[in-house]
Amino acid sequence: MKSAVRALFTESELRALLDHEEGQFLEFKSLWDHSRDPPRLLERRKARDFVAESVAAFANTDGGTLLLGVDDDGTPSGHGYPGEVLDKLFAMPERRLRPSVRCVVQRIFINRKEILIFQIPSDPEAVMFVGNGFPYRVGDHVVHEPQEVINERKEAYRRVGYEQRVRQDATLEDIDLDLATQFLKSTVFRGRSTEELLARYGLLIFRAGSPAITNACLLLFAKPPITRWHPRTGIRFFRVAGKERLHGRERNVTQIGRIDSPLASAIPEAHRLAKEQIRRSEKLYDSESRFMPVAIRSLSACWPMWDSCVRREKVYPEFSTRWKALYFDRRSLPSKLESSRSPCVTSRSSPGPVRNGRI
């Protein structure tokens, strides 16, 4: 099983990718030994071992992109290896891994420095780096896990992977392509068609020329009514007058809104609705909209780091402690996503029972 050579990125797309930080799905590796002055080429054996370990670690999680010839800060530094050495690097996923992993590779020049790109898929079973166990990627680090642990995780994802399942009764006409275009415009592939982007992230699957629609695509971008595709979609907001919830004649809970829209538009709307409930006199009020409401837990339809199908969130505008509990720092959201599951839908948890959002 040999790696396939293909154009993965255009020059502009790769430059945009280099502006990102390393994380769960992206790794930079310089091929120069900076411990010496002046820097020298990294020993060939160390370069081969690094490729094999990195590919295995990505394959044992959700896949990712490995860029060789790039410093940790994203600066292209290139390499000085002859062609036969590069051939051996590209052959590492086949020669040193069991089972072998079929990667897609690309050679491209940026600022006259050649960068070697490996696009690594997630493997259905644990991949061993021969002689060095089973690497597993966690954030921007590689750890080692037992084979049975990795296989148990992969089997669990296959068993409950609701979002990656194809809806046979859905067509492209059911997708709000304008919403998808707006949502995806910040990716490095923003110059490509919306359909191509959806396919690249595993939301559409082209079969015999026609697209098959996944549940994840519908939950993110479906045209209304969204309940056609999942009966428990939506977010309900409740306002609590005071510092605790009361019942009966003293009931102090009022529903202040409901959002029935796909996730791509529900999240900003939930943010707006929650922000309206914060009084300007409260210390937690932020005129720059710094916080994202806990309603984004409904993102678990695509990333299981949050509870599934959250429908109700209670707001305590007079009680700072509870109010703090309702928020994530909006600025840290991208890093939280990247350190969790892959945005390319490969395996996800199925929606569980609806929870009442109680803090």
Image (tube, helix red, strand yellow):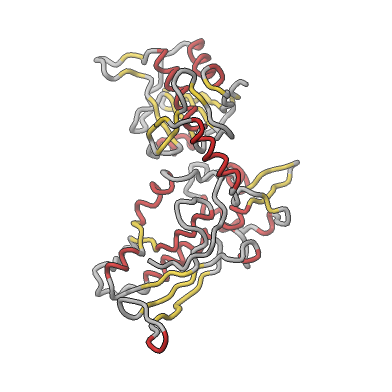
Count of numbered circles on the image:
0
Percent coordinates x, y for residue 117 in the rendering: 49, 27
Camera-nearest residue between 206 and 146: 146
- Judge whether 230 appears above or below 142 on screen: below
Percent coordinates x, y for residue 58 in the rendering: 48, 32
Camera-nearest residue between 14 and 319: 319
Percent coordinates x, y for residue 5 in the rendering: 59, 24
- Quadrant hosting residue 282: bottom left
Can residue 192 be spotted in the picture?
no
- Judge whether 100 appears above or below 351 on screen: above
Please identify the quadrant where the C terminus is shown: bottom left
- Quadrant hosting residue 206: top right
Residue at 54% from the left image edge and 58% from the top image edge: 352
Q: Is residue 289 left or right of residue 309?
A: left
Can residue 285 be spotted in the picture?
yes
Residue at 61% from the left image edge and 48% from the top image edge: 164
Q: Residue furthest right?
A: 208
Please identify the quadrant where the N terminus is shown: top right
- Judge whether 103 appears above or below 48 on screen: below
Residue at 37% from the left image edge and 32% from the top image edge: 74
Percent coordinates x, y for residue 300 in the rendering: 50, 55
Q: Residue furthest front?
A: 148
Residue at 30% from the left image edge and 64% from the top image edge: 324
